[in-house]
Amino acid sequence: MDAELGSLAEALGRGIAEGSPDLNALLSDTASRSGVPSLVPQLNQVFTRFQGKSGAWPLAAQDMFEVLRLVRLRDAVVYGELKVIAEAFAEDERARTAPVPQHAPDTATNVNTVSGGTFNEPVVQAGSIPGGVHTYYGQTPHSGLPRVADWPQLDRANAIALGVRRPRRIADERPLPRYVVRDCVPALDAQVLAAAREGGLVLVTGEPLSGKTRTLWAALFTNLPGTTRIIHPAPGTDLRGLTAVLRARGDAECVLWLDDLDGHLGEHGLTVALLVELARLRVPVLATMSDEAYDTHRFGSPAHTRLLSGVDPVELGAEWSPAEVERLAAAAPHDLRLSGAYAHCARHSTPEYLAVGPELLGEWRRARRANAHPLGHRLVLAAIDLARCGVEEVVGADVLRTASGFYEGAAPDVSPEDLDRALAWAAGVRHGTTGMLVPGTEAGTWRAYGSLVEDARDGMPGFGPVPPELWRLAVDTVDHVDDVLVRARAVLGPEAETNPQALLTLGRIEEEYGDEEVAEAWFRRAADAGSTEAAGRLGSLLFHREDMAAAAPYLEKAAESGDVDAQSLLGTALLRRSEHWLRTAAEGGDGFAACMLGDLRRGEGDHQTALTWYQAAAAQGLRTRVASRIGWVFHEWEHHKEAEKWYRIAVESGDLSAANDLGLLLENRGAMEEAVACYRQSAEDGNATAAHNFGIILNKQGKREAAREWFARAHELGDYDGAYRMGCSLMWENRHDEAEEWLRKAQEVGHHKADSALADLKKARTAAHRPDTPASGAPDNVKA
C-alpha cells in the first residue's frame, strides 16, 4: 500500500512542480473537503516551496505522501478522486517519455516476432526487432478522434453545426444575425481569455432557448484567434484519447467545444482527470448546459459534482434586461430578423423568437397538403393575415373560421369537431415553448406567433396578399379601427398603382371609418382602373352628396354590371336630373315640361303641386292633354262636378282612356246607362281597365258569355284580373278544364288569388257539382 502512496505522491508532486494552477485548485478544494483541517496549510506550504522550481518535485512528493496518507485514513471518497488525478498524470508522463516510434524501411516485410513479454498496444510492423526488451506507445485503441490538423479553424467553423440554432434567412442575409451583446458578456469574455491562457472549463448555463450557445460562440469568436482549431465531438464520444491527439498538435491553438455538456459526461467523457490534463496542455473547454441539467449534475450526482464544483458558471437569463433590449433596438434597423425580434420582445424572448420561428414556419408550410392539416394551415394563415391587418390580439375561433374560408381550397362547411381538431393542432406546443397560435389577451381568443407574422410581412415564400374580404372582416372585428386603418394605408397604399382591388378595399375602409374625401379619391382611382364595384361606391357617395350629374356616369357603369343598388340610385338620380331640367323649362313657359312635372308630383302623392303644374300646362295650350289628369285630381278630392267637367273635356277631345274614369264617376252617381256606354267606348278603344269593368257590368246583368269575351279582351290588353275573372266565370258553370286553363294564366301573371281559386276548382271537381259562388272571395266590382 505504501508503494501505491508513493507512486501517487510522485505523480501529484510532478504536477505541482510543473505549476498547474488547476491541479493546485483541485488539491486545495479536495483537502478542504477531507475533514483534515491541517491539510490546507500543509498544501499551501508545498505550493510555496516547490511550485515552479526545477527539480523540486521529489521533495514535493514527500509532502504529498503525508497528505495522501491522512486523506486515505479520513475520507475514502476524496482519496479516490486524488487517485484518479494522480493516475492521469502518471499516464501522461509515460506517454511523454515514450520513445519515438521508428518508421520501418521500405523493404520491410510483414514477418514480426514478439516474445518474452506482453504487448497490449496496437501491433507494430517491422522487419526485425533484435535483442532486449522493447516498449512501444501508440495511439490508444479507444480513440476515434481526428487529428488536430483535421479540426476546422475557428474563422471557418460553422456556428450552426456547432449547435447555434438556425434562424430564418431572407435573400442574401448572413446566416446569423448580428449578435446583441448580453449583460453577462464582460464576465464571460474574461473567463474565455483566462481559459485560453491557462486552460480550464468555461460553462454557460440558462433556460432552454435563452441564447446560451449563441452567446458562448460570440465569446469564443471574439476572444480567440481565427486560426484556433476547434473540435466539437458528438454527445457520447469517447474522449480518453483526446490528450494523445493534442500532444501531436505542434504549436496549434485548440479549443474543445461541448454544447450541452451533460451529453459529454461519464467515465469516457469529460472527467476531472481529463480536465486537469487539458488545463496542463493549455486547451480551454467551452461548454453549455441547461439550468435543469446543471442542477441535476452539480448537486445530485456525486460522480459529476467534483467536475462542476470547480467551475463558476455564467448564468444567462431568458428575460432580457432594459439595457439588453436597448442594444437590440439599436441593432434592429440593420437586420429584418432583429427588427422582428424587437417588435415582439414584449411577448417572446429574442433567442426563442429567432430559434423557434424557422421551425414553426417550416411545419406550417408543409401542413397545407391535403393529407396533413389544411384547415389548421388556413386557421394559422387567417390569424397571420388578421395581424397584418392590425388585429393581433382579440381573434375568436368563429372569426378564424370565417376568415379561413377566404382562401383557396377552403371547404364550404367546417364542422365544430373539425374546427376543434384544427385549433388543437395549431395551438399545440412545439419545442417546449409555443404553438403557431397562442392565446390572446381575452379568454377564447387567439393570435399568431409573432415570428410568423413577421415572416409574412418580410415577404417570405408561402404568403400572398391579404384577401380583400379579410380586410373588411378585420374592420368588423375590432372596436377601434385606427390600427386597421393605419395598416391598410401602409400595406395597400404601395399596391395601389397596379391593384384596383387594393384601391377599392382602401376606399371602403376609409369610407366607413376614415375620411370620406379620401375614400372618394380611392374609389375614383379604382373605378377609372376598371372596378365596377368602385364605380358603384363612388356613384353612391356622389348621389348622397346630391351631385347627380357627377354620380350618373359611375352609377351607370355599375348598373350595367348588374349592381341592383346602383341601378336604383341611377334611376333616382336621372329622375332628379330630369325634374331639375323640366322645372327649368316649365318656368321658362314650356307646357309639356309643366305636364311632366305634374306627373312626377302626382306619382309622389303631391296632388296639390301636380294640379298647379297641370293648370300651368293648360294655360300654355295643353288644356286637352292635361284635362283627364286634372279630372283625376278632383276625383281624388271628391270634387265630382269639377272632375266630371274635366273628364268630359278630355273625352270630347278624343282621350277615350278618360271615358273609363268618367264611367266610374257616373256609376258612383247612379247613372248606369251612361256609365256602361263610357266603359264600352273606352274598352273598344283598347283600354284594359275599361274592358275589365265592362265585363263586370255584363256579368252582373247575367250576360256571362258576353262578359267572358271582355275578360279575355282585358287579359290580352294586359289587365291583371282578366284571366282570373275568366277562370272564375267558367268554374261557376262547371267548365273545369277551361277554368283551369285560365286560372293557370292568372297564376303565371302572379294573381294573388289564383292559387286559392285552383284549390276551389279541385274541390269542385271532386264534388262534381257547380259551386254556389265563382270562387272564394272573388270580387265583382269595377276598377278605377
Image: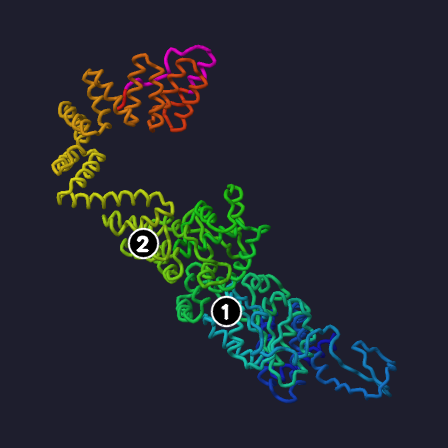
Q: Nearer the viewer, residue 247 or 721?
A: 721
Mark 2 to mark 1 CA distance (whole Å):
35 Å
Q: How many marks?
A: 2
Left or right, 112 with reference to 341: right
Left or right, 68 with reference to 362: right
The residue identified by callout 2 is 510
Please identify, in this view, whether the residue under mark 2 or under mark 1 is nearer the observer. Answer: 2
Which SS class for mark 1? loop
The quarter of the displayed image where residue 92 is located: bottom right
Query: Quick check: 754 above or below 14?
Result: above
Q: Point out the image quarter for the C terminus.
A: top left
> Is any part of residue 81 visible from this angle?
yes
Q: Nearer the viewer, residue 719 or 218?
A: 719
How packed mark 2 is, by other alpha carbons closer than 10 Å (few <14, some 14-19, many 20 or more), is: many
Disc 1 marks a residue whose amino acid type is Ala
Q: Nearer the viewer, residue 743 or 25?
A: 743
The residue identified by callout 1 is 171
Query: Quick check: 573 above or below 711?
Result: below
Which SS class for mark 2? helix
- Of marks 2 and 1, which one's residue comes earlier in the chain? 1
How packed mark 1 is, by other alpha carbons closer than 10 Å (few <14, some 14-19, many 20 or more), is: few
The quarter of the displayed image where residue 392 is located: bottom left
Assess whether mark 1 and mark 2 are in contact (beta carbons under 8 angstroms).
Answer: no
| Range covered by the magenta-colored residues | 758-781
